[in-house]
Image (cartoon, coloured by chain):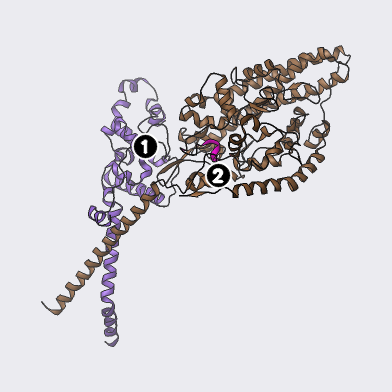
Amino acid sequence: MESYNSQRSVYGKFKVVLIILAGMIVGLFAFNVYVSNAVSYLSDDPGTCMNCHIMAPQYATWNHSSHREVANCNDCHVPHNNVFNKYYFKGKDGLRHASIFTMRAEPQVIFIKEEGKEVVYNNCIRCHSEEIIDPRIEAKVDNYMHILDNRYCWDCHREVPHGRVNSLSSVPYARVPVPESNVPAWINKITK
Amino acid sequence: MTHQKRKTLRNWLLFIIAMVVVFFLGLLASSITERKAEAMFVYSPEVEIGDFEPRNEVWGENFPMEYETYKKTSDSSYKSKYNGNTMIDMLEVDPRLVVLWAGYGFSKDYNQGRGHSYAVIDARNTLRTGGPLKDDEGPMPTTCWTCKGPDVPRVMNDDGIAEFYMGKWARLGAEIVNSIGCADCHDAKTMNLKITRPALIEAFERRGKDINEATHQEMRSLVCAQCHVEYYFNKNIVEGSAYLAFPWDYGTSVEEMEKYYDDMGFKDWTHKLSRAPMLKAQHPGYEVYLTGVHADRGVSCADCHMPYISEGGQKFTDHHIQSPLNNIANSCQVCHREETQKLIDNVYERQDQILGNRDKLEELIVRAHVEAKFAWDNGATEEQMKDILQGIRHSQWRWDYAASSHGGSFHSPVEISRVVSTGITIAQETRIKLARLLADLGHNIAIPYPDISTKAKAQEFIGMDAEKLKNEKEVFLQTIVPEWVKIAEERENGWSVKYL
């Protein structure tokens, strides 16, 4: 009983400090969730991709394309075969992007990866299948499906939708949404 | 409320207060960081830059990102298949060059150049500028300094343009000390691109064009065209002045410039073996680029050699001017989706194929020079040799146009192939005439190809004393250059820099 009591008293001595420390850790976590716009990542808003400013060319070119009216980033760039796969892919890709951006390791010209290409390709088909497959030709032409399936859509439709000039610097004056300031107006007023 | 309950409540309160305090401290920290970041986007000049400020490091105070990248031109570690920015002794790589340029400075010493920041040092070091011990000694005129750095517009402004081109190279040794940099291409007040060399402005004027009408995108090539062009020294414009001029009056193709030179009866030198009135093509990089598909699509020199980059969300031009082969991602891949290695292979393939024919042409011209010398030695007359010498002049001009345009076989592969093939035709026509002449002179046998397998053998073949040149250079570098550096340092120490 003796040792149990002494342990209790040590805990009691530092209890206040520990509680404050725990509060600080939870507070800091909440703060990081807030400043990183973490909640926005659950949405489909293209503005979310602009949390990282290096996505400006992708946003600006999409924003000037006809796809703007019907498709957002996620419609093309994450899989839509089932909801678990969607968030798995989004989480995986998002964390990779966030890590690269944080370490300032982004290339000047961003290329899409193999995995991403497959996702986009399947999403082209998801919306455009009726324009792609013509049952009359399919009935007449041997290997029709093979011929159809041996290249990416954008091997020919090269402008769709991001244009052909790829560089972080390609749209220097584009008006794109930038992350809003995390500082509330009243703090700005005080610190003015 | 019991004691225990009060204690639990107090603990929760402490926990929540700590949380909230940290959260707001975070917000405050954010505000401070944001305010600090604002300063980065405000242009805050450190110094006032004078109109003819030649010191690149002074400009660098105001434009650190551009200056930091410019300084990378002192990196000499990149080697492509044929060029790059490492110093390569081209006469050693290809000793036939010694014979082609016999009697002319380039047979003494010719290296693959290094980056812009070595312009002054390499001009002092090359054997072509000799070992002058006095201001009025040495083989070269002051005009050779014209492209070496931002001290040139300063001295031209002080002394006058025609006056700049007067006298020997050594006369301005203590003046031209800062290597190619900021003030060569930029206006000190507006930072706009600016043409600082009169030869380009004058060449435009003679063709009835106003260079001030050029668009910004054109200027991104024209600032390079101040130097990376074919030029010559005209001694008939101003008495005593080796006036720098571009032969563009009829146009910039190989035939148009050749006609210009032929019409005015100009020659750079008389060939030591064949006695042909030779033309030395300098480096018609801009002229060749104009004929290529990239120029046709509106791509400028800077688009590939100084691509835009973004750092921290700020876009600026990479002032590390270099071969795009060392930076495929930022140059080619902005427009071309292919893999890096694929794009490099595409360039090398064009270079390999054109070099194959250019090599052949080179050998034919060496033979023509040797055969012409043989004809002279066996009693050929001026009248008999006239057409032959003109043929040698024209074929070597074409060879040199292709060779000295450096990136030419990529900048415009079709045009360069055409130029090389017309060169081969002229060289062979000339050698048929030579064969007939030699037969007339009683020599119906092949003239043996000389043993010029190394630079030393080739220089010996043309009768050059390379050791003497090297010794003179050594003395010059030990005695004269330190004096120049000292005078320049004293001058620049006298200039104040106005900090803002």
Q: Identify by letter the chain in brown.
A: B
Q: Residue at x 28, y 58 (%)?
A: B27
Label 2: chain?
A: B
Q: Residue at x 33, y 49 (%)?
A: A91
The image quarter containing residue B434 is top right
Viewer-nearest of discs 2 and 1: 2
Q: Residue at x 24, y 63 (%)?
A: B20
Residue at the spot of label 2: B56
B404 vs B225, nearest the viewer:
B225
Residue B454 image offset from top left, x and y in percent: 78, 36
Residue A26 image offset from top left, x and y in percent: 27, 63
A102 vs A43, nearest the viewer:
A102
How packed mark 2 is, by other alpha carbons closer than 10 Å (few <14, some 14-19, many 20 or more), is many
Question: What is the span of residues highlighted in magenta in the rendered image?
Answer: B179-190
Q: Are marks 2 and 1 on the same chain?
A: no
Helix, strand or loop at label 2? It is: helix
Residue B232 image offset from top left, x and y in percent: 66, 26
- Does residue A103 appear in the picture of this structure? yes
Q: Name the image quarter holding the N terminus of chain A.
A: bottom left
The image quarter containing residue B235 is top right
A20 vs B41, nearest the viewer:
B41
Do callouts 2 and 1 mark residues in contact (Cβ within 8 Å)?
no
- Amino acid marked by disc 2: Asn
Give the colour of chain A: purple
State the count of labels: 2
As drawn, is B259 to the left or to the right of A175? right
How packed mark 1 is, by other alpha carbons closer than 10 Å (few <14, some 14-19, many 20 or more), is few
In the drawing, what numbered circle is on residue A173?
1
Distance between mark 2 and mark 1 Cα atoms: 29 Å
Helix, strand or loop at label 1? It is: loop
